[in-house]
Image (spheres, rainbow, N blue to C red):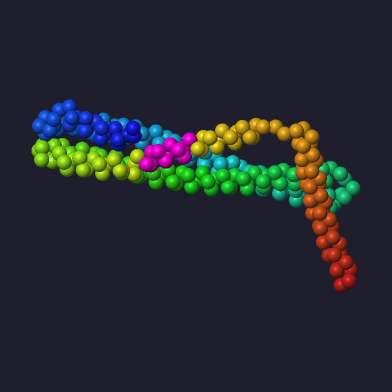
């Protein structure tokens, strides 16, 4: 039985056990019932708040990782520029080409990570915003319970108000808070399941030969890219010299 369903059961059970006359003369019993329900709701709200905080912290980690990768990319771009300049000045020195290839390979790796993390950050932000809205709705329902606590105590002072209380409790049973709690639980459980699968997948290994092919391919692509950059720079320099000679 859900939280608000238990609240209604408690109050209705009190009706059955005590009778209408006793209920109308015992507003403290109803007040105590609401107090227990409100405390339980506050505890559930706190649990959800902590869960949302954990999601927000994961979003912050993703943001920090993206910033770190961005700084590293800027540094590598500078180093790549230096390697290109050195290779242009000393085309027969293989050290410059090896360094430039290494820089280009890492830049390609960073770009791939940035794309994945950017997509992940977008999803995390949407979830955090969604859960914040649910928390605000849940808090509104708690405040409603507090208001109703006083209202119901006043109503119970007269046995003629018992039917009105029943109607209000039926309305309370249809509140969105209960649905929000269930939805948040399902989403958090799904998130944990996804995280577990992602962890398992990330720890899975592929064949050593496939990994070797992948590494060789990445190095080849990086080396080719460096050669293209160097060739473009040399051709540009040659065109400038030819133009200067024609003008002279």
Q: For residue 239, what is the image quadrant?
A: bottom right
From the viewer's side, name the closer residue of 233 and 247: 233
Q: Is residue 47 left or right of residue 32?
A: right
Residue closest to the far bottom: 247
Query: Magenta part of the protein: which range?
Result: 179-189
Image spot of residue 246 (x, y percent): 89, 71
State the residue at coordinates (23%, 40%): 169
Judging depth in this view, the residue of 142 and 91 nearest the camera is 142
Residues 112 and 241: in front is: 112
Q: Residue at x 51, y 44 (%)?
A: 124
How many numbered marks does the figure carry? 0
**Residue 76 in view of the camera:** no
Taking the image as shown, residue 27 lies to the left or right of residue 98, namely left
Q: Quadrant of the C terminus?
A: bottom right
Farthest residue to the front: give it.
Answer: 16
Does the stretch in magenta take in 73? no
Is residue 189 left or right of 70 when viewed as pictured? left
The residue drawn where x is 46% and y is 44% is 128
Q: Position of residue 132 (x, y in %)?
A: 41, 44
Can you give x and y, in whole percent of width and height, for residue 182 in the image? 40, 38
- Asked where in the image residue 27 lies, by quadrant, the reply is top left
Query: Which residue shows up at 20% across the image and 38% down it?
Result: 149
Find residue 203 and report its horizontal and vertical position in percent: 65, 31
């Amino acid at each position: 039985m859900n939280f608000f369903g238990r609240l209604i059961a408690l109050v209705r059970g009190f009706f059955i056990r005590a009778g209408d006359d006793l209920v109308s003369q015992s507003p403290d019993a109803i007040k105590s019932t609401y107090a227990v329900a409100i405390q339980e709701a506050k505890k559930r709200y706190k649990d959800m708040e902590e869960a949302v905080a954990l999601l927000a912290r994961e979003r912050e980690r993703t943001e920090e990782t993206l910033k770190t990768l961005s700084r590293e990319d800027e540094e590598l771009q500078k180093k790549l520029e230096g390697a290109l300049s050195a290779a242009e000045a000393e085309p027969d020195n293989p050290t410059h080409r090896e360094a430039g290839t290494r820089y280009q390979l890492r830049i390609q790796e960073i770009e791939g990570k940035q794309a994945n993390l950017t997509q992940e950050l977008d999803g995390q932000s949407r979830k955090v915003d969604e859960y914040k809205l649910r928390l605000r709705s849940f808090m509104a329902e708690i405040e409603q319970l507090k208001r109703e606590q006083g209202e119901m105590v006043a109503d119970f002072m007269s046995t003629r108000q018992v039917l009105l209380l029943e109607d209000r409790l039926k309305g309370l049973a249809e509140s969105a808070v209960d649905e929000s709690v269930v939805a948040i639980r399902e989403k958090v459980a799904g998130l944990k399941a996804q995280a577990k699968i992602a962890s398992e997948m990330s720890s899975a290994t592929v064949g050593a030969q496939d990994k070797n092919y992948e590494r060789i391919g990445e190095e080849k692509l990086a080396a080719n890219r460096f050669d293209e950059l160097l060739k473009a720079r040399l051709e540009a320099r040659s065109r400038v010299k030819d133009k200067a000679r024609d003008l002279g």
